[in-house]
Image (cartoon, rainbow, N blue to C red):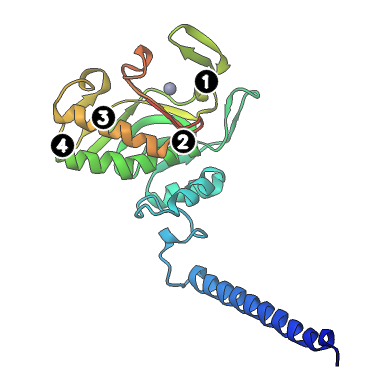
Amino acid sequence: MSEEKQRRPVLRWAALSVLSAISSAALFGLLGLWLLLRPDGPLPDHWNPTKRLTVAAPVTIVTRFQMMRALGDVAECRAVLDQAGVAFAPMNDLEVDENCGIAGRGQLSKLANSRLNRVETRCATVLRLAMWEHHVVQPAAQDLLGTSVSSITQIGSYNCRKMRTSRGSDGRWSSHAKANAIDITGMRLADGRRLSLLKDWDGDDPEAAFLRKIWRGSCDWFRLVLGPDYNQLHADHFHLENTGWGFCR
Ligand SMILES: [Zn+2]
């Protein structure tokens, strides 16, 4: 027998072994994934990317993925808010033109643990607000002020207008034109104290520290945030935006 003929079965055997090792690994991998992700599997929901976001669940590396899915799907967004106890009464979409309108529209009057003066906005804006309230605002109030926030004051979300800058009107449309932002001016605490950005932002007291902490923390849950340190136009409010490019000032 030639050497060439002897080598061939060995090569074939090696190739077959490698193939079967790869397919076994893939099979075990799939089986493991199926065991983890099935409805009664051992993985907690907040670690399972196939599960719906729960506002009050601990934050994990999966939370952002679950949140992005809910932000992009109005039905899922509404279900997440319902489950969290957020009062967001559904309304028909507002269709104005390509620049203005509200998709996923509703009337917000309460987050999970604080009231809000009523506002018409879109579900995605409410969802980010709900995550901020639960994971930033209430814990910061407990830590720094020893109480909870009972209500949040907003001065508007939807407004069909162009952007305002310190030099006047900008040519571009504001994120408010599609209710992709909300402006927050202050809070009332459960012990009766009232905080306003205009009066309480500057200073060394716990109230100022609280406002700065929730401003910093809002950057984790919104895509663009403008506060009193940005410019004079924002001296009295946080502009919290659902769109934008990660700017926080
Ligand atoms: Zn604004």
The answer to which of marks 4 and 3 sits earlier in the sequence is 4
Ligand 1 rendered quadrant: top left
Measured Cα–Cα span from mark 4 to mark 3: 13 Å
Q: Residue at x 50, y 24 (%)?
A: 176
The answer to which of marks 1 and 3 sits earlier in the sequence is 1
Residue to which mark 2 is pinned = 125
Measured Cα–Cα span from mark 1 to mark 3: 25 Å
User: Looking at the picture, does residue 122 appear above or below residue 234?
Assistant: below
Relative depth, front residue between 16 and 132: 16
- The label on residue 145 is 4
Q: Position of residue 170 (x, y in %)?
A: 53, 11
Q: Amino acid at mark 3?
A: Arg
Q: Amino acid at mark 2?
A: Thr
- On screen, residue 115 versus residue 49, left or right, reads left
Residue to which mark 1 is pinned = 174
Q: Position of residue 51 (x, y in %)?
A: 49, 59
Measured Cα–Cα span from mark 4 to mark 1: 34 Å
Measured Cα–Cα span from mark 3 to mark 2: 21 Å
The answer to which of marks 4 and 1 sits earlier in the sequence is 4
Classify mark 4: residues with Cα within 10 Å, few (<14), some (14-19) or many (20+). Answer: some
Secondary structure beneath dot 2 equals: helix
User: Looking at the picture, does residue 16 appear above or below residue 179?
Assistant: below
